[in-house]
Image (cartoon, helix red, strand yellow):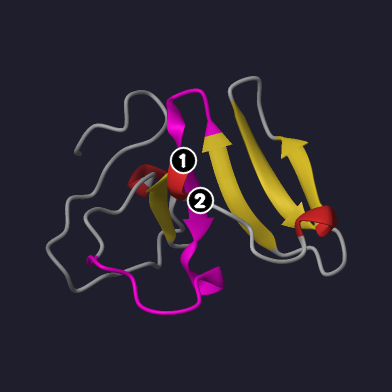
């Protein structure tokens, strides 16, 4: 799943905010889903308190930058192979390059 991080102060839901449901996936992070279809819409957490991470497939229109890294690379399924040279970041323990 590809996320794009945006400043929380610049993020707005233009329609359907009443259909968003918050799920606390841990003590430090939460996600919002559509109560009607179950689609994941956003991720937020204490690690990035001023950002909202939006599932890229939910963005209507172009995004002004290319992907910068593959996060949680050590948690991927073993058959995933990518042909790019983006940094592969580890998991939740600091998310450092591996």
Query: Which residue has dot 1 on it?
Result: 9
Name the residue rendered at 50%, 51% in the picture. 11
Nearest the viewer among 89 and 43 is 43
Q: Position of residue 96 (x, y in %)?
A: 24, 32
Which residue is painted at 48% across and 40% down in the image? Answer: 8
Task: State the image quarter where residue 26 is shown.
Answer: top right
Q: Residue at x 19, y 38 (%)?
A: 97
Does 62 appear in magenta? yes
Instruction: Give the quarter of the image for residue 72.
Output: top left
Mark pair 1, 2: CA separation: 6 Å
> Dot 1 surroundings within 10 Å: few (below 14), some, or many (20 or more)?
few
Residue in the foreground of this view, choosing between 81 and 34? 34
**Position of residue 20 in the picture relative to residue 31 (left or right):** right
Above or below: residue 31 compared with residue 57: above
The residue at 63%/58% (across/down) is 13
Name, please, the residue furthest toward the left: 85
Mark 2 closeness class: few <14, some 14–19, many ≥20 residues within 10 Å: few
What is the number of callouts on the image? 2
Judged from the image, the secondary structure of the residue bearing numbered disc 1 is helix
Which residue in the structure is indicated by mark 2? 11
Q: Which residues are magenta?
A: 45-66
Outermost residue, top side: 27
Vertical arrangement, residue 62 with respect to residue 75, above or below: below
């Amino acid at each position: 799943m590809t996320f794009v991080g945006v400043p929380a102060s610049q993020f707005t839901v233009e329609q359907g905010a009443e259909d968003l449901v918050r799920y606390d996936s841990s003590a430090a992070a939460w996600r919002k889903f559509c109560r009607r279809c179950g689609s994941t819409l956003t991720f937020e957490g204490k690690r990035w308190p001023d950002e909202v991470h939006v599932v890229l497939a939910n963005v209507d229109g172009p995004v002004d930058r290319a992907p910068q890294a593959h996060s949680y690379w050590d948690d991927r399924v073993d058959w995933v192979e990518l042909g790019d040279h983006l940094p592969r970041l580890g998991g939740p323990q600091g998310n450092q390059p591996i």
